[in-house]
Image: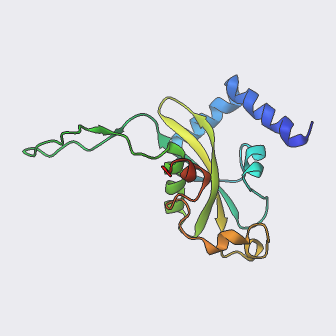
Amino acid sequence: MGFYKLVKEAFEKEHKERSPLYKKRLIEWRKAGIVERANKPTNIARARELGYKAKQGFTVAIVKVGRGRRKRPKPDLGRKPSKSGRFFSPGKSLQRIAEEKASTKFPNLEVLNSYWVGEDGSYKYFEVLLVDVNHPAIKNDKSLSWICKQKGRAFRGLTSSGKKGRTS
């Protein structure tokens, strides 16, 4: 059995059993802002599967997205409320919304991919892998130089979660 397979199994076991480390992370993430930069990925095996490399030019962001139904703002007094009601479905997955939030927070970076890392009663937490397309280490890497030619991948549905949400 390979090293990353062991790491993956340990991470899954930790989340299933709701270990003290997992609970501690959730408390920290809940107190933090919506998009926060992380030093390194919490699930290194999953990050490596999705293209992460421990080199300059890579950034990891933890994004929290509210769970549950979306709610429109309350109508102003005197105005007729919409017939569709106040709750609506955004038509995008929470993971895709997390990628867009990270892309907005770091406009000079491109979203490579993202994955789920945890959830509690109010939020779902995703780690988003971001790449600096202007960094020489990324431009010179043959396996990553393709991303330098793309702009706004998260908003155009070019990440894996964005492709899943397409109708055709």
Task: Using the image, determine if residue 39 lies above or below residue 1.
Answer: below
In percent of width and height, residue 139 lies at 73, 75
Q: In which quarter of the image is the N terminus?
A: top right
Q: Residue at x 50, y 56 (%)?
A: 100
In percent of width and height, residue 145 lies at 72, 72
The quadrant where residue 112 appears: bottom right
Q: Residue at x 18, y 42 (%)?
A: 82
- Of 64 and 144, nearer the camera is 144
In percent of width and height, residue 110 lies at 60, 65
Please identify the residue farthest to the top as the structure is shown: 17
Q: Give the mark count.
A: 0
Residue 34 appears in the figure = no
Residue 26 appears in the figure = yes
Please identify the residue farthest to the left as the structure is shown: 78
Q: Which residue is drawn at 64% across and 37% down?
A: 25
Q: In this view, does 63 lie to the left or right of 46?
A: left
Please identify the residue farthest to the right as the structure is shown: 1
- Of 27 and 40, nearer the camera is 40
Q: Is residue 6 left or right of residue 24?
A: right
In percent of width and height, residue 51 lies at 74, 56
Task: Using the image, determine if residue 14 lies above or below residue 159.
Answer: above
Task: Using the image, determine if residue 65 lies above or below residue 121.
Answer: below
